[in-house]
Amino acid sequence: METMARPLRAGRAPAELMAVYAAEERSSLPGEEQPTEASGPEGSPGRAQSADEVEPDARFSFANERTFLAWSRTALALVVAGLGIIQLLPPFPGIPWGRHIVGIPLILLGSVVSVVSYLEWKSSQRALRRGEPLTRTRLPQVLAATVAVIALVAAALSVISAATRS
Amino acid sequence: MSPADDIEDTDPGLARERTELAWTRTAISFAAIGGVILKYEPAAGLLILALSVLIWELGRLARAPGPAGPGGSAAAAWVRSRRLLLIAVAVTIVSFVALAIVLFGPPSRGLRL
């Protein structure tokens, strides 16, 4: 069987490339057997996969996996930051729960990022298998907004604490 | 031609190595937070340290060109999905342990600088 060449198309986004590759494979395989005894990541190994799903290019799967791992490390960093703020920072004078107000949202955000990033990975992998555009994620906006709000709260607590002390 | 016959699927070059390094960084992150939690909750800290070893080993599977690596069969995709689910569950557990420490642990006076 002849190996199909897959030259990279310069200037195209990965999702667009995957759509092109998937379309090429579907159109070039009219008589070839399609995977029937297969599954997506959400299923069991024996679960049937729909005929229009093709395992994506390994490079895209690896990139998707690395993105998920990067989000997981971000989630861990948020948890460590929250734990560190509560356990290592000296208490805000006059505000006994001040450290908890800053640290607990960071820890909760870490668990949310972890779960949502897994769902995002799953969604992206499904889109890659189907040759569809990747779904737009709101996770970076949520992370940036939450961290900004927590930073503002921390600044406000510092000011209030200093005013209370003086 | 099945997708696995494509040379770029069977040998994705340095993408595999980059992914293995990402797994290694994740395992080191787990080990670091396990070390931190070990100070407050030794049992939970040891559990997280053991998880970091498991994640390190799972990362080595990313290097394998066989069924465990991405781009392989559907069964390999299922295995990959479960590996990543384990990471998501582990991070969630770590955050709950951290939450338990800060809510129910002894109050900390913080570092004296």
Image: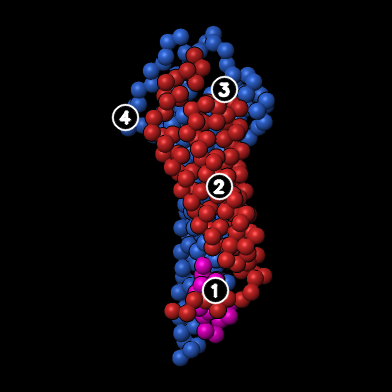
Chain colours: A blue, B red
Q: Amino acid at mark 4?
A: Ala
Residue at the disc numbered 4: A10
Residue at left 55%, top 47%?
B53
Q: Report, in whole angstroms, how far the alpha carbon at label 4 lies from the one at label 3.
A: 26 Å
* The label number, if any, that marks residue B53 in the structure image: 2
Magenta span: A84-97
Point out the tag, 4 or 3, that comes first from the N-terminus. 4
Point out the tag, 1 or 4, that comes first from the N-terminus. 4
Front of the two marks 1 and 3: 1
Label 2 environment density (alpha carbons within 10 Å; few <14, some 14–19, many ≥20): some
Viewer-nearest residue: B105 or A155: B105
Residue at left 57%, top 62%?
B37
Q: Describe the element under mark 1 as helix, strand or loop.
A: helix
* The label number, if any, that marks residue A52 in the structure image: 3
Q: Position of residue A83 (x, y in %)?
A: 55, 66
Q: Amino acid at mark 3?
A: Asp
- Can residue A120 be seen here? no
Label 1 environment density (alpha carbons within 10 Å; few <14, some 14–19, many ≥20): many
Residue at left 65%, top 71%?
B105
Subunit ID for the residue under disc 3 = A
Q: Is A109 within the magenta?
A: no
* The label number, if any, that marks residue B93 in the structure image: none
> In which quadrant of the rendered image does the C terminus of chain B lie?
bottom left
Subunit ID for the residue under disc 2 = B
